[in-house]
Image (cartoon, rainbow, N blue to C red):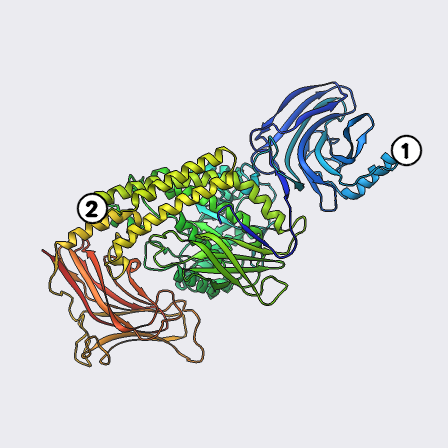
Amino acid sequence: MRATLMLFLVAGVVHGQQILREGFESKGPYWKQGSSDAVFKLIRHALTDETAQSGQRSEHIRLQIERGSYIHYVFDIPRAPVNDELTVGLWIKSNRPGVQLMCRVVLPRERDPKDPSRNLTCFLRCEPYNSTRWKPLPLVNPVKRLREQQQLLNSKLGRDVSTAGAYVDQVVLNLYDGPGTLDVWIDDLEIGPVVGDPKPEGIVAVPTVRPTPGSLVPRGSSEVRFAGQRLMIDNKPFMMRAIRHTGMPLSVLNMAGFNTICLDETAPTNRIEEASKLGFKLVPTLERRSDDLQRRMNRFMVSEAVLAWDLGGNLDADQFTSTAGFARMVQQDDSSRLLIADVWDGFLGYARGLDGTLMGTHRWPLFTSLELANYREWLSHRRKLTRTNYAWTWVQTHPQEWFLKMAYPKENSNGFREPVGPLPEQIRLLSYIALAAGYRGLAFWSDRFLADSHQGRDRLLGLALLNQELKLLEKILQEVTDEVEWVDTSHPDIKAAIFRIPRNVLVLPIWVGKGAQFVPGQSALVRLDVYVPAAPITTTRGAIVKLENFSLATAVVLTSDMSKNGMVVHLQTMQQGMAKTAAQWLHDQAKEELDKVEQIDAALIQAGVGLPDAAALLEKAKKSLEQSRKFRTDGQHSEGYAQAEVALRSLRVLMRAHWERAVRDLDTPTASPFAVSFYTLPLHHELLEELRGLKAGSNVLPYGDFEVPVGQSQPGWTVQEVPSLDPVTTEVRRVSQGAHGGSGQCVMLAIRPKDPRRVPAALERTFVALHSPAVKLPPGSLVRVSGYIKIPAPITGSADGALLYDSAGGEPLAVRLTGEQKKWKSFSLYRRVPPSGQIHVTLAMSGLGAVYFDDVRIEPLTR
């Protein structure tokens, strides 16, 4: 989708009608001096950031007026037909209460008696300005007011005047209000529907595609509350697009479209004030101590920008009592704001015991063996466990610490000289998967990995584009009340989320193909069919939506809402406003990714594992980028955007081809810790080259064949059972039937419902594991960890299922299986012994069903 959104109209057609919105943000001034009979002096006419109704700027005019009756300043617009759908509005602030807004109406079937070469015109007055504060001046009942002007003209000209086809072509401000100094600030013009290009000469892109930078937060307390699945601020829906602030300039995050900042309580006062001035909502994280709590909270409350108080992250059931106690202390000092909590388990207790809490949960799937389809399943299960209508989640924008230490041991937290993931496309997929799982608030974990120091400019641009899209879809997402449907499409790697609201259906096809958490690949199709049950709304048979050139994630709106404030006009207007910026941002993102891909491709060529099509794909990407630049220079922003997308697809094809070649001989991509990211593939091939000169020695893991006499314990092996929150039983035991090789024993791990008639749909906290004894080997030496796994029936209730992992790679690099595996299958993992000189294996089960393990080994690799 990006900045392009497909509209499928169930009824009605719109021919070039759009709403014109101008926020007076750049390249002004916009208003021109018109006719006047007054004596006056122009003191100032410029854009200013001194005050604004929304956004960062407004247009300021200062006049020294003597005598007269009118001083007109005009703003030309495309034709806006005068009918019941016509909407005109302008925000004004002035030191004088007599400023008047009018609309000039052209009567195309009448000639001006004073100048027959011109059409006759008249003026419709908008509501009067009788304040000295910001106030909107709407045009009320335009058809009635035109009829009144028609009657006056009939009387004046002595004949019937025709108003057929009448349209507004200009809005006019009369700034005369008697002698003296007049200051007027102008902001947020909205008029339409207009016919033709809504951006005549001098009109810039609509600023509402971004959050409102620079607007001062009202000092009055904002009311924050829930309304079903919606978060409301001052009775307006609010979709949280948050980011954890760790150093990126706030102005940059503001321009990237974030509307909420998560701050540590140690944030300096000037940073709090700057965030508030830029229009951010704040989520402060407080240390869990009672001393001086009110003073620590007051530092943030001065600005009245606090959205919610953060109670902490990864909260589990065991922490509920202490969390609830701290929450009561916070609410005693500030009962008007919500709380926010990131919960791992114990959802029912938190939901019932923490009233007014924004409940969230998260996990990091990138660079791990958790497939994106299973990540969506995990998110969906967790949201339902919250038992609340509203849920939010953190979105991964960074590599985890374990991966950085393993892949970039010589780098430090201050920055990276080499390319580092994740890819912007992966962040985009995670975000849309979260929406598809029913989450209504998104928070992005790390602004540090958006910085140039962390090779993050492509991620920053990708998130700026994503925030545009979320803003575009916000109106629909905020109105969804039914459960999101998750349906198949014509391609097995693409699923679609269906959101339903009255008169509208939003369809989000999303690529969830295997391995996308490592390298997403092209993730595109020339043609995709999506069957939407019961759509259009007026039928019961449903509809097939046929998409061309699908890429990653696309938004499709099925609508019958053709009203002047309806979905079609809303989406068209926003798309028009974001087209120019989106085209430039996507071009720049593609350029950043091209530079990184070329660097890694060159390293792979040097390692002797280059691809024959690499040069052609890189050249195609470069040509597409040049085409994108030319289109944008000529003002063809949609075409420029499309060419930037072509460039990115070429790069994704190349990255995926390199990755598939790298992992083709592995039992699982996580067999090599460096095969989980495109940017570490050179390290992976170095590891493979080292492995080619080694051979497996004797197994050093005792009793991994589970051949211990019945009734005796298995020396050194220990069972771990996390106290369950679910109505299940667990079992770990050696069994003699069906062992690998046909005889002997294997080990079975099983989780079963206590009542077979009431099977839990999802397990909240159930985990049973069997840990091997640690074996001692030279630090830094290579080993092969292997084992056989059999799963007689699919594992349910968990996105993780059965796991086999080692202490060097940990759970993120586990063999992770949920599907049926009736025959024994072997898996091998290649690991380097940690500095401790010890390594062990874990066999685990986290879902409903049974799994069998046998012949688990740790074999040193030697020359």
Question: Quick one: label 2 or label 1, which is nearer the N terminus?
Answer: 1
Q: Secondary structure at mark 1?
A: loop
Residue 517 vs 410, above or below: the answer is below
- In this rendering, would 407 be left or right of 458? left
Residue 214 vs 467, above or below: the answer is above
Distance, label 2 to label 1, CA atoms, is: 91 Å
Residue 370 rendering spot, x and y as whole percentages: 35, 60
The C terminus, quarter of image: bottom left
Residue 854 rendering spot, x and y as whole percentages: 22, 72
Q: Nearer the viewer, residue 710 or 492?
A: 492
Residue 780 in sight here = no
- In this rendering, would 548 be left or right of 80? left
- In this rendering, would 131 be left or right of 816? right
Residue 244 in sight here = yes
Cβ–Cβ below 8 Å for labels 2 and 1? no
For disc 2, the neighbor class at 10 Å (few under 14, some 14 to 19, many from 20) is: few
Disc 1 marks which residue? 158
Residue 68 rendering spot, x and y as whole percentages: 78, 21
For disc 1, the neighbor class at 10 Å (few under 14, some 14 to 19, many from 20) is: few
What residue type is disc 1 on? Gly
Q: Secondary structure at mark 2?
A: loop
Q: Which quadrant holds residue 830?
A: bottom left
Badge number at residue 608: 2
Q: Nearer the viewer, residue 308 or 125?
A: 125
Residue 215 vs 15, above or below: the answer is above
Q: Nearer the viewer, residue 421 or 218?
A: 421
What residue type is disc 2 on? Gly
Residue 680 rendering spot, x and y as whole percentages: 27, 48
Q: Residue at x 83, y 28 (%)?
A: 113
Q: Residue at x 57, y 44 (%)?
A: 574
